[in-house]
Image (spheres, rainbow, N blue to C red):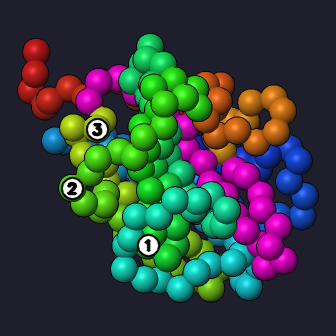
Amino acid sequence: MSGVTLPLLPHPGAAGVPVTRFATCAQREPDGGLLLAWDLGFVPGTIRLPAPALPVRCDGLWRHTCFEAFLAASGAAGYLEFNFAPSGAWAAYAFSAYRTGMTALALDAPPPARWQRADSRLVLEVRLPGALTAGALRLALSAVLEDSSGTISHWALRHPAGPPDFHHPDGFALELPAFEEQGAT
């Protein structure tokens, strides 16, 4: 996948995390959609991964290993949150402002997600439709990892000061311009 590729960084409070590499990528698609990817390398047997299952909408995915995306229109206080667990479970929410006005995002179907698993690698590609990604965007791409002992670590493009907080406006570290159709003048 081409596009903007950036590393995910552990929260400064994370210790002994068995990750060998962690990168994310965001790419606009010709129809205005957004393709997001997470590529995690880890020491085999050190990250708890649930067995794959059918995609089901589920709250509380952040309590275990999951990959997350937060999207905000440039200049807007409101934002969207998407969570994806290696089991296939997913969640989507809309917020009117920082941690305020949370509602389940009305979607007819889960965003198309493709997981690839290996002993030491986990890759997720998700496609968000153009109806959700129109205009210039600010993105906060992140992840929660649960190691084999049950310890949680938090990973993000940028961590604001203090405890882990993926919702914080300072974490929206990636800016994408509005999609422009090919050939537009």
The residue positioned 84% from the left and 77% from the top of the image is 149
In this picture, is 44 found above or below 157?
A: below
Q: Is residue 31 above or below residue 118?
A: above
| Residue at numbered disc 2 | 108
Where does the image place residue 138, in percent across and percent down from the top left?
47, 28
Instruction: Please name the predominant secondary structure of the magenta segment in the image.
Output: strand
Give residue 153's quadrant in the image.
Answer: bottom right
Of labels 1 and 2, earlier in sequence is 1
Which mark lies nearer to you, 3 or 2?
2
Marks 1 and 2, how far apart at CA: 16 Å
Asked if the stretch drawn in magenta spans residue 167, the answer is: no
Amino acid type, callout 3:
Leu
The first of marks 3 and 1 along the sequence is: 1
Q: Residues within 10 Å of mark 2 (few under 14, many from 20)?
A: few
Q: Disc 3 on helix, strand or loop?
A: helix
Q: Residue at x 55, y 44 (%)?
A: 141
Q: Which mark is residue 132?
A: 3
Q: For the magenta stretch, what is the residue range?
A: 134-155
Closer to the camera in the image, 39 or 105: 105
Q: Which residue is mark 1?
A: 88
